Amino acid sequence: MHPALSLLLKLRGRARWRRMIAGMKTVKGAMLVIVTGLFFGCMILPNLLLPIASSFSEKGRDLNAEMVKTAHDRVLAYAPLVLLAFSLAAIGTSMGEAAIYFSPAEVDFLFAAPFSRRELLLFKLRQSVRNALFAGTLFAVVTARFSASLLNAWLACVLTLLFMNALTLALTLLGQLITERAYSQSRRMILIAAVILIGLGLWQALLAFEGRGPLPVAKAFAESPAGRVLLAPFTVFPRIMVAESLAGAAPWAAIAAAMIVGLFALAISLDVNYLETAQHVSQRVYERLQRRRAGGGAISAVTIRGATRLRLPRLPWLWGVGPNLWRQELLLLRRSQGLMLIAVLMLVVGGFLAFNLREAAAKSEYLVPGLILGGLAYQSLLASMQLPTGFRGDLDRLDWLKSLPLRGPAIVCGQISGAAVLLSLFQALILIAAWAFFRRGHEVFVAGLVFLLPINWLIFGVENLVFLLFPYRQAATTAGDFQFVGKFLLISMLKAGLSCLGLTVAAAGGILYLIVPSLWFPLTGSLLLLLAIDGAVLYAASLAFERFDVSLHTPA
Amino acid sequence: MIQVIDFHKTYRETVAVRGLSFEVPAGAILGLVGANGAGKTTTLRSLAGIIPPTQGRLLVAGHDVVKEPLAAKAQLAYVPDDPKLFDELTVWEHLEFIASAYRVANFQPLADELLVQMELTEKRDALAQGLSRGMRQKVAIACAYLHQPRAILLDEPMTGLDPHGIRTFKASVAERAKLGAAVVLSSHLLSMVEDLCTHLLILARGQSLFCGTLAEARSRFPQMSGEASLEEIFFHATAG
């Protein structure tokens, strides 16, 4: 590789450490690193300690052996299918383009510099190898308990990641080699061939199904002629993971390494002029990242063509709340298309579940409404984190918001209500549809409809209040931002804690049931308490907004 | 020094540039002007070897950008309209990297000189992510000058620069041209182009409306008076 590109990798590696160490020099930064460490520790430690703990008794050892055996069966059956599905998704969608993604700075500096395309590709490959080593090590620690040794697990994870990378890179460049039009056709042909083979395999698998569960179906598919052809390269990697010793894993690891080297060699030997495509990919990924940094979550950063033209009639003045509320709702409709897609999918899945729950619903009046309300509460929490809404979505426009001739509470109310109203409307439609379908548990449905808006308002109000007190970007500033995970966790915990506190206080209205044993009396009490808490959140958020200093508190 | 011969660039059905030909000799500064979407950035990006031409030849210091990309790129510097720096690297590390990429031996004295010239000395060890828009532009320009390129491509180079920065930048471009570099500068600031450029290329919808010196432009459009400004010439040429 060109020495300058090696130097760049070295400088960037050094910069990451520098950034992390600089971040740890403050008490806040050090605490965030500790929280991040604890988070990963909680993920990893149980996997390391469980086999040790179980080795103290015979029963524990047997139980652990049984668990490992079951896991091996599942890994061998499902892992090749998952890898195949991922590869097909990479060919069929723009996921594969990530293989030739260069950051905007790399495009600006490297593409115009005297580096050959092969040198740039090698640079990219070295980055991929480094990332695979890091991620593979992390996965290996988590999965080691299901493997003969940590080294087996490490080999399996690293080689799998490298293979997936090499495969998508080789396929993307092969597609590039043929002209764009032919590329689409060839890609379509590969997909059609794969779908036919999968269809044949699935047909045979379903014939063997006989209601025995998904594991036999997966095994039958893998053993069908079509499954064998499609899954052949992917069956190598789980075998490294489940091999009984390092020596047993060695031949499979050698095959995997040969496939990876072959694919990388193919990608480099093609010498495709990928620079123009890489530039477009870079631009798209950069724009997506900017949308995330502007406040939306990963899902909402996905765009659907045409959705940006959605319109909404202007709202009345509403004591100064109207203009901002209208702007928020319009932006939400135009920006959060990915989330709308998820909502539609949730509706489809919900409809399917509802259809299958008819018998259970006949037995218990409150089961289905309870499940639906639980699902909607989860949706509200997810939406409060994912929607590019409120002050988080307007982080780079706070100076403009502050310059508006509107009172603080009116601005804050508009910022909070946008998402709360829109989400409540959507959820009310779901509740009404479910009510009409099941025709039971009327009280729960009515209570759900009454409480929807105040609860959503509380969740989004707390989200905005906490954001104004501790502003942060939704996406990490740079790859070396190690404190990001810790910061995000702490803020999420604070938001969840405040929302739960508000809901618990509101639920205390249920005490009124002791005075008047009727359902509606305590519900009215809870509703009034909830509205009072909403008012308190509005007041606190207005104060926080007025004290927010754009020049000091806007994060980089 | 820079030669563009019958250059075409098409994106699917959209024709960005159609049959463009021009030449920039050593020491000349060519002002590339045109409305948004006229094909200025596409032309510069193709000359920089970032996007391949659909048809035609692009030569930098005698090297074909498509056939001998490395030799051509070694002779040129390109500053995009909104340069993206490596956020996590310092200003000095950017220069260090460029020196390595273009194999500039003993780059430190020249890099120090450029930092002084661009008023970046105090920001030498600052991370790029903390720099203002203008500062980032200055870093990109300093990086472009470090390897003493024979062809310089500048896309809207003055965006974000302060008045002092603009003056320094203009002087630096004139100095580079005096030393023998061929400069292509794309800008919407017509008065600046008029001040700085020796040659002019007016683009509209991917085609050349005029290419030559300013004096030639005035004689080319007989309706214009001998004292007509570039602004008047531009609007006259692009009208209709």
Image (spheres, coloured by chain):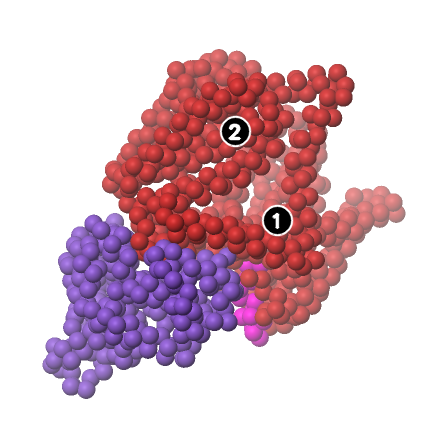
Chain colours: A red, B purple
In front: label 2 or label 1: 2
* Stretch in magenta: A392-405
Residue found at x 55% / y 26%: A152
Q: Where is residue B40 in the image (x, y as percent from the top left)?
A: 26, 64
Alpha carbon of mark 2 to alpha carbon of mark 1: how far?
27 Å
Binning the other alpha carbons within 10 Å of mark 2 as few (below 14), some (14 to 19) or many (20 upward) gives: many
Check chain identity for marks 2 and 1: say if they share one.
yes
Marked residue nearer the N-terminal end (2 or 1): 2
User: Which numbered tag is attached to residue A155?
Assistant: 2
Q: Is B222 included in the stretch rendered in magenta?
A: no
* Label 2–label 1 contact, CB within 8 A: no
| Chain containing mark 2 | A
- Quarter-of-image position of residue B45: bottom left
Quarter location, residue B146 = bottom left
Instruction: Report whether A375 appears left or right of B44.
Output: right
Q: Residue furthest right?
A: A515
Say which mark, if any, is on residue A554: none
Q: Please indicate, yes or no, whether residue B190 appears anywhere in the rendered image.
A: no
Residue depicted at x 36% and y 60%:
B105
Closer to us: A430 or A124: A124
Please tell me which residue lies in front, A524 or B159: B159
The chain holding disc 1 is A
Residue at horizontal 16 percent and vertical 86 percent from the top: B225
Image quarter where the N terminus of chain B lies is bottom left
Q: Does the magenta stretch include residue A393?
A: yes
Q: Is residue A15 visible?
A: yes
Look at mark 1 in the image and give the residue it sits on.
A485
